[in-house]
Image: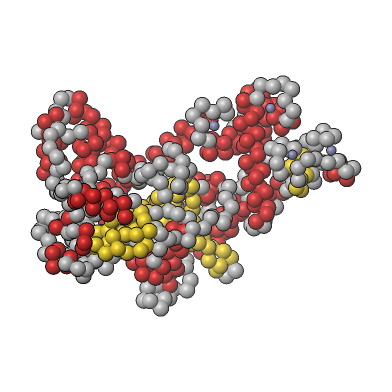
């Protein structure tokens, strides 16, 4: 994966009887501006979870429960927030948890019901409708199928390819695609593929919508049409595409702070032209949040808008005598020039918490499972929440005791000064008192040895310092693993190398409770978690990364299978 992905868990705590209780969580992946398309500027929301302790249990002023109102507000706030960071789309998989399956919070109250698929979908639609009407953060809502597959309601100029669909970790379709690709490769190997006359070809030909062109299907075409069949069924509305900025119907780029040429149904000449579309004609209105569901709204064309570049290109085509690419006999004159306001971009003001437990859903769940932090009763939820907060604010930073770079004396934790520039420069309090000087600014070190002391909240400054300390330690690890200089000036480098030496010779090991070995494993794990180098010098890095990847893949595979099973049962029940 190129570019940066930020994984985060958003947790709502409510103060109940003076104690913060975790009630609602969501797990998101943010694919930044440095990611390659199609993932660029995409947010993926794949898990939300809650426990039913929200108080008071009353209705809000708009006729929904106060709980729903607050949970919606959090999502709406999040949508506004990512929009101002420059994100363009949010993909949502509305997947209800299976009974007995914990998404983020461990061990739910036994009497809490899991929402049905259609209820969860409606819950999201309500939220998105409010986000569009109240906050203006949502420009357009559609589905994965409508956007990328043949017969979808979104206008496409060209046939889509699989590589145009954002590939989001743990998402449903990439897993299906892997299975399908294996089947397609089998079919092609047994010589059935060419001619489009095979079982695969016939199936695709019979699918809804017209084929683009003719001739033998490529692997990409075969994959896309098979995926379209799967995602176009009763799963269709569960995979939502939320546009935070206005998309161009031709090039699919998002427009902010520019001009869009919009088709307005009541605009000049338009309404009468398109009032009665032929039954087979494609429509382009995306989801109507007012009436979601598989039945297409039967009104006139609602949503067609093109950017200035596409508008000008279209003008040149028409002037050159080429066929217009506008649907339904529309001409450029039917489009109304509409200014699109720019987005007030902000920078993310929150420093990275740097806590490994909050980075992935699984790490968080494992922390709770391993420590029996349960949420099945209010009393337990209170205790579990407190422990979760404790871990959030006390990340396991494997701090090495440091040595004074002036007098080479071991510095007692929390008593020395550390350079804010050098990765490894410390001074003891005696040298400071003696007036020793270093060329960079120095800060007092925090005492990491005291983390057992129960403090659930650190100051912002302390949190930033801890994170910096962690980053320095990890940089040092990479240095020490590739440093072969016996005269290396860094004392910490020698310490890390001594630690490796110890680990090789140690007879106790982690299983025997060796403190040093534990420290080393903790460090290697932390490194592997964030390492993206393929030929990394750090020992065990590749193994640990592979282990982590396999564990995650296994869990996601189970979720997909359970979801597919649930949808099959729902389809069978509907017949
Ligand atoms: Zn365009
Ligand atoms: Zn000293
Ligand atoms: Zn320095
Ligand atoms: Zn070194
Ligand atoms: Zn050991
Ligand atoms: Zn590595």
- Coordinates of residue 370 in the picture (x, y in percent): 53, 46
List x then y, in percent, for residue 390: 61, 54
Direction from residue 158 to residue 166 in the image, left or right = right
Using the image as rendered, state which of residue 59 and residue 460 is in the foreground. 460
Above or below: residue 475 compared with residue 467 = above
Which quadrant of the figure has residue 125? bottom left
| Residue sitting farthest toward the front | 319
Task: Say which of 110 and 230 sits in front.
Answer: 230
State the residue at coordinates (62%, 37%).
474
- Residue in the image at 23% along x and 41% along y: 224
Q: Quadrant of the C terminus?
A: bottom left
Residue 112 position by quadrant:
bottom left
Q: Nearer the viewer, residue 524 or 348?
A: 348
Q: Is residue 235 visible?
A: no
Q: Is residue 41 shown left or right of residue 122?
A: right
- Res 554 → quadrant: top left
How far from the left and from the top, in percent, is residue 367? 53, 47
Q: Position of residue 431 (x, y in %)?
A: 86, 41
* Quadrant that contains the N terminus: top left
**Is residue 528 among what the camera can see?**
yes
Q: Is residue 518 above or below residue 95?
A: above
For the point 26% across and 34% down, which residue is it?
181
Above or below residue 149? Residue 526 is above
Q: Residue at x 20, y 25 (%)?
A: 189
Question: Is 369 displayed left or right of 340 in the figure?
Answer: right
Image color mode: secondary structure
């Amino acid at each position: 994966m190129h570019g940066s992905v930020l994984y985060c868990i958003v947790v709502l705590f409510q103060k109940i009887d003076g104690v913060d209780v975790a009630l609602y969580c969501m797990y998101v992946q943010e694919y930044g501006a440095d990611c390659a398309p199609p993932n660029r500027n995409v947010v993926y929301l794949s898990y939300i979870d809650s426990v039913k302790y929200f108080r008071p249990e009353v209705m809000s002023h708009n006729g929904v429960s106060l709980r729903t109102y607050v949970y919606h507000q959090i999502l709406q706030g999040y949508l506004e927030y990512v929009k101002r960071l420059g994100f363009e789309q949010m993909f949502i998989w509305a997947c209800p948890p299976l009974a007995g399956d914990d998404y983020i919070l461990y061990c739910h109250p036994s009497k809490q019901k899991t929402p049905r698929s259609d209820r969860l979908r409606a819950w999201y639609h309500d939220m998105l409708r409010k986000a569009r009407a109240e906050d203006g953060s949502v420009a357009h809502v559609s589905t994965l199928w409508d956007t990328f597959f043949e017969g979808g309601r979104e206008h496409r100029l060209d046939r889509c390819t699989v590589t145009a669909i954002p590939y989001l970790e743990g998402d449903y379709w990439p897993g299906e695609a892997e299975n399908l690709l294996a089947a397609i490769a089998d079919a092609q190997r047994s010589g059935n593929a060419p001619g489009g006359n095979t079982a695969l070809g016939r199936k695709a030909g019979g699918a809804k919508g017209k084929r683009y062109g003719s001739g033998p299907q490529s692997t990409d075409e075969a994959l896309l049409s098979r995926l379209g069949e799967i995602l176009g069924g009763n799963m269709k509305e569960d995979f939502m595409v939320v546009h935070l900025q206005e998309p161009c119907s031709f090039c699919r780029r998002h427009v902010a702070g520019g001009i869009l040429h919009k088709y307005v149904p009541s605009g000049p000449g338009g309404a009468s032209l398109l009032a009665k579309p032929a039954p087979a004609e494609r429509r382009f209105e995306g989801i109507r949040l007012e009436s979601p569901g598989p039945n297409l709204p039967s009104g006139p064309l609602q949503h067609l808008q093109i950017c200035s570049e596409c508008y000008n290109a279209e003008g040149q085509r028409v002037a050159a005598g080429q066929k217009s690419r506008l649907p339904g006999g529309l001409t450029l004159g039917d489009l109304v020039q509409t200014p699109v306001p720019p987005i007030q971009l902000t920078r993310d003001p929150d420093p990275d918490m740097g806590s490994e437990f909050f980075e992935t859903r699984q790490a968080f769940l494992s922390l709770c499972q391993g420590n029996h932090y349960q949420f099945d009763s209010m009393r337990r939820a209170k205790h579990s929440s407190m422990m979760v907060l404790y871990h959030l604010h006390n990340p396991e930073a494997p701090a090495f005791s440091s040595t004074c770079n002036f007098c080479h004396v071991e510095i007692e934790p929390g008593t020395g000064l550390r350079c804010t520039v050098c990765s490894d420069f410390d001074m003891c309090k005696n040298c400071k008192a003696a007036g020793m000087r270093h060329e960079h600014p120095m800060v007092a070190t925090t005492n990491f040895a005291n983390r057992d002391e129960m403090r659930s909240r650190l100051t912002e400054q302390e949190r930033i310092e801890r994170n910096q300390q962690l980053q320095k330690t990890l940089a040092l690890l990479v240095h020490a693993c590739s440093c072969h200089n016996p005269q290396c000036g860094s004392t910490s480098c020698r310490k890390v190398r001594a630690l490796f030496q110890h680990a090789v010779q140690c007879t106790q090991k982690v299983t025997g409770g060796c403190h040093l070995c534990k420290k080393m494993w903790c460090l290697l794990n932390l490194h592997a978690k964030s390492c993206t180098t393929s030929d990394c010098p750090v020992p065990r890095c590749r193994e640990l990364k592979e282990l982590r990847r396999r564990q995650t893949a296994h869990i996601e595979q189970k979720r997909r299978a359970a979801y597919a099973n649930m949808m099959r049962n729902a389809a069978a029940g509907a017949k």
